[in-house]
Image (cartoon, rainbow, N blue to C red):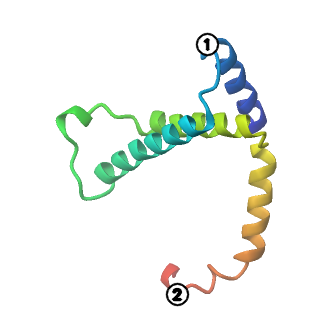
Amino acid sequence: MEIKQAQHLVDNWIKTTGIRYFNELTNTAMLMEEVGEVARIMARQYGEQSFKQSDKEVNLADEMADVLFVLICLANQTGIDLTDALEKNLQKKSIRDADRHQNNEKLK
């Protein structure tokens, strides 16, 4: 699935099943909540924290998909084409960081 297609599918889902978009501020808060859930799993699965009994059934892929879903909602609401935005962002990074990482002793 391409990003543009994902934006269309989410928009269709919102307008049929979800009834309407939450406002942008609510969706921003929801995005932070979903990112926090990803962070909690990462801290427990890859960091030093341990899982609580109630956390045993977590699903990292599902939580990442939740982040992507809400991000796509915000893009749709604000008129952002995520394909175009990502392409421009990668171009910016390619110019800005052309030599930066090759010359970083910490990465060797």
Q: Is residue 41 above or below residue 47?
A: above
Dot 2 or dot 1: first in sequence order is 1
Circle on res. 105: 2
The image quadrant that residue 13 belongs to is top right
Q: Residue at x 26, y 36 (%)?
A: 55
Residue wearing tag 1: 17
For residue 90, side relative to residue 35 (left or right): right
Q: Residues within 10 Å of mark 2 (few under 14, many from 20)?
A: few
**Residue 65: x and y, percent?**
53, 35
What amino acid type should be assigned to the residue bearing mark 2? Glu
Mark 1: secondary structure: loop
Q: Residue furthest left?
A: 53
Q: Is residue 1 above or below residue 29?
A: above
> If the image is split into quadrants, where does the N terminus sit?
top right
For residue 34, side relative to residue 88 (left or right): left
Q: Residue at x 73, y 76 (%)?
A: 96
**Residue 37: x and y, percent?**
39, 42
What amino acid type should be assigned to the residue bearing mark 1? Thr
Q: Residue at x 22, y 43 (%)?
A: 51
**Residue 15: x and y, percent?**
69, 17
Q: Residues within 10 Å of mark 1 (few under 14, many from 20)?
A: few
- Depth order, front residue of 108/10: 10
Mark 2 vs mark 1, CA separation in Å = 51 Å
